[in-house]
Image (cartoon, rainbow, N blue to C red):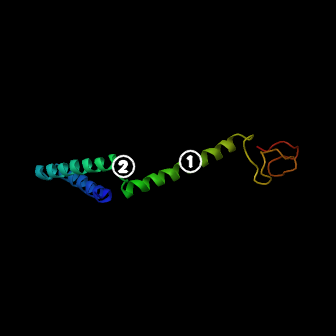
Amino acid sequence: MDPNATLARLREAIADAERAMDPESGSNDAEHESLSEITELAAALDEWLSRGGFLPDAWQQSDERDAQYRARAQQLRARLDQESDPFKRQCDRHGGPWGDDPTCAQCTTVTGRPRP
């Protein structure tokens, strides 16, 4: 069984069923045929995956995009965390905590206090 071909056929059958269910089509035979094919393909794909078969390419790519999205979201949350709490921020100039170096003009005011 080729899960990529099965997924493509399953998607085509779903589209056919949606078109057949359009009230203007008036075709119960086409609807029955499409729904029968959807059932058959879904069962085949379920059996394939249940036995440890690989995912169709379209689903694997989604997993990779999701992983990239989660990693980026985690980076943004960490950055927001640092920016919202001045004691967690790191100075780009000296690499230490924000306001830690009284001689650093980037993160410390003239009076030696951390910049907001």
Q: What element carries label 2?
A: loop
Between 52 and 116, the one nearer to me in the picture? 52
Of all residues, the one furthest to the front in this rendering is 51
Q: Is residue 8 visible?
A: yes
Place of residue 23 in the rendered image (x, y in percent of width and height, measured from the top left): 16, 48
Q: Which mark is residue 52?
A: 2
Q: What element carries label 1?
A: helix
Q: How crowded is mark 2: few (under 14 residues within 10 Å), some or many (20 or more)?
A: few
At 19% across and 52% down in the image, what residue appears? 37
Q: Which of marks 2 and 1 is nearer the N terminus?
A: 2
At 30% across and 58% down in the image, what residue appears? 2
At 33% across and 49% down in the image, what residue appears? 49
Place of residue 96 in the rendered image (x, y in percent of width and height, measured from the top left): 78, 48
Kindly report the distance in space between the C-alpha atoms of the residues bearing marks 2 and 1: 30 Å
Is residue 6 positioned above or below 86 on the image? below
Q: Residues within 10 Å of mark 1 (few under 14, many from 20)?
A: few
At 53% across and 48% down in the image, what residue appears? 70
Q: In this view, does 2 lie to the left or right of 35?
A: right
Q: Which of marks 2 and 1 is in front?
A: 2
Q: Is residue 99 left or right of residue 77?
A: right
Return the residue at label 1. Answer: 73
Between 112 and 74, the one nearer to me in the picture? 74
Q: Is residue 14 left or right of residue 106?
A: left
Place of residue 66 in the rendered image (x, y in percent of width and height, measured from the top left): 48, 50
Which amino acid type is shown beneath numbered disc 2? Answer: Gly
Q: Do the residues labelled 2 and 1 touch (CB within 8 Å)?
A: no
> Looking at the figure, which quarter contains the N terminus?
bottom left
Which amino acid type is shown beneath numbered disc 1? Answer: Ala
